[in-house]
Image: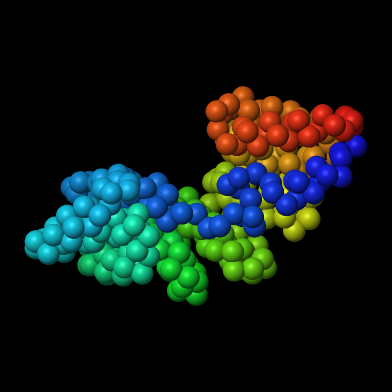
Amino acid sequence: MIPSFLVAALMQVGPNPADIRSVPPPDPRDAIVRQDSAARPVSLPPCPVISGSEAAEQVVQSARRRAESQRGLEKAASLQCLGIAQADLSQWNSAADSFAEAAQLASEFDEGRWRAVIGAQRGHALLSADRSAEALSAFESAAALAAIEGDQDLAGQILSDKARAEVAAGDIGAAASTLAGARETAANAASVWLLSATLARRTDDLAQAQAFIERAAELDRTDPEIALEAGVIAALQGRDDAARRSFDSAVALAPDSETAASARAYLAQLSVGGTEE
């Protein structure tokens, strides 16, 4: 039987970063770095990966390139890099403006997927600037553009970001609806099913959470976050042995990660209780 204190811990904390109720929306910088390399035209250099004091210099350099660029595509690229640097400095409103201008310039070219990514980056900046309504609109438009371009996985990822924003705003119903759309759009994206499982668990629909996490595991058996979430769901269902196996798997897949640390903590707490299977 699972100890009552562990039930409380699982429901209140849950795995990180999959637990979309207890953590803030993704850091815009993380999303920007993740999406940038695959989003720009091959003829343009990628934005440099920067941090800390380098960001201030990158703002200066990107602004200079923007002023010097004659071609619209190059100017759009410099604006995207400028937005990335501004986001690193937490200049969210300025970053949102830079991304908006970049997307407008990019619209003159056949670069729909790039525009979708820039739109999602703008959504993250707007969200961090506490402009939630505009952020949700930006995510929705970016997802629609990605779908038009035929990139279903990107569309699903952006819809997942929109769902996170809706959870952060306390609109669980809207988030559930958005994730339903994400599952339909990107049926083979394991991250979408993982996020769906987490939201279902947080709303105490463990049967639905189990179905979602099983689908996520079918699509990706190497993601420790999926294993961790599977363990949380199993533990809440009273299936202690299954929970242990999932937590052990999370540790084995990424032994030095925060995910593994969470799994070890849950394993230690499970050892207080008995086994069921």
Residue 27 vs 236, above or below: the answer is below
Expressed as whole percent of the image width and height from the top left, the position of residue 142 reads 42, 64
For the N terminus, the quadrant is top right
> Visible in this render: residue 144?
no
Residue 69 vs 241, above or below: the answer is below
Residue at x 58% of width, y 47% of height: 17
Residue at x 45% of width, y 64% of height: 128
Q: Which of 190 and 276 is in front in this view?
A: 276
Q: Which colour scheme is used?
A: rainbow
Residue at x 21% of width, y 52% of height: 57
Q: Horizontally, is 214 left or right of 205 in the view?
A: left
Residue 228 vs 180, above or below: the answer is above
Q: Horizontally, is 19 left or right of 235 in the view?
A: left
Expressed as whole percent of the image width and height from the top left, the position of residue 35 reads 38, 49
Q: Nearer the viewer, residue 79 or 151?
A: 79
For the C terminus, the quadrant is top right
Expressed as whole percent of the image width and height from the top left, the position of residue 122 reads 38, 64
What is the quadrant of residue 168 in the picture?
bottom right
What is the quadrant of residue 88 in the picture?
bottom left
Residue at x 39% of width, y 52% of height: 29
Expressed as whole percent of the image width and height from the top left, the position of residue 177 reads 63, 65
Q: Nearer the viewer, residue 161 or 257?
A: 257
Q: Horizontally, is 86 left or right of 196 in the view?
A: left
Q: Horizontally, is 263 left or right of 108 in the view?
A: right
> Visible in this render: residue 154?
yes
Question: From this viewpoint, which residue is outermost toward the bottom?
Answer: 133
What is the count of numbered marks? 0
